[in-house]
Amino acid sequence: MVEHNKEIVRRFGELCLGKGELRLVGELVGDDVVDHNALPGQGAGRAGIIDAILLLRAAFPDLHVVAEALVGDGELVAARWSMSGTHLGEFAGIPASGRNWELEGMDLYRIEDRRIVEIWPHFDTADLLRQLGA
C-alpha cells in the first residue's frame, strides 16, 4: 500500500503539475481534497486543484517537476521535490518577466481510497517571488 501511495504522489507531481496532464487528476485526487496552502483565489476540492494547475501552467508553460524523494507511512506520503520553469505569464499579480527559476520544497499528502485527499505544500514563496523579480 505504501509503495502504491508513493506512486500516486509521484504521478500527481510529475504528470499533473509538471506536464499538465489534467485527465489524471480525477484518477489521483479525491473530489473533496483539501489543499492546506491553496493559491490565492484557488477554489475548493478537485476543481480547485485543476484551477491551480491551470494557473501554474499559464504562468510557467514549461513547468518541470521532479519528485526527488518520497517517504511513506501508511496513508501519509512526504515528497521532496524540485521545480523549475520560465515566467511567461502573469503569476500572483506579477507580469511575465521571462526569467527562469528553480525551487525546492516538501509536501505532505494523505491518501485515502487510492486518491489524494489532503495536501500540505511547503516551499519558499519569498524565494520564488525574488527569482521572478518581485
Image (tube, rainbow, N blue to C red):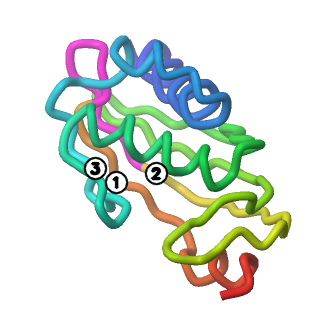
Tell me which residue sits at (46%, 51%) in the image.
Answer: 107
Q: Which amino acid does label 3 sit on?
A: Asp
As measured in the structure, the alpha-carbon distance from the residue carrying label 3 to the one carrying label 1 is 6 Å
Lateral position of residue 130 relative to residue 40, left or right: right
Location of the N terminus (image quadrant): top left
Secondary structure category for the residue under label 3: strand
Residue behind mark 3: 35
**Residue annotated with mark 1:** 120
Position above or below: 28 against 55:
above
Residue 102 falls in which quadrant of the image? bottom right
- Seen at 46% across and 63% down, the residue is 122
Relative to 123, is 76 on the left or the right?
left
Q: Is residue 121 above or below residue 108?
A: below
What's the magenta region? 108-116
Q: Earlier in the sequence, mark 3 or mark 1?
A: 3
Distance from disc 2 to disc 3, alpha carbons, whole Å, reads 11 Å
Q: Residues within 10 Å of mark 3 (few under 14, many from 20)?
A: many
Where is residue 33 drawn, in percent x and y? 21, 36
> What is the chief secondary structure element of the magenta stretch?
strand
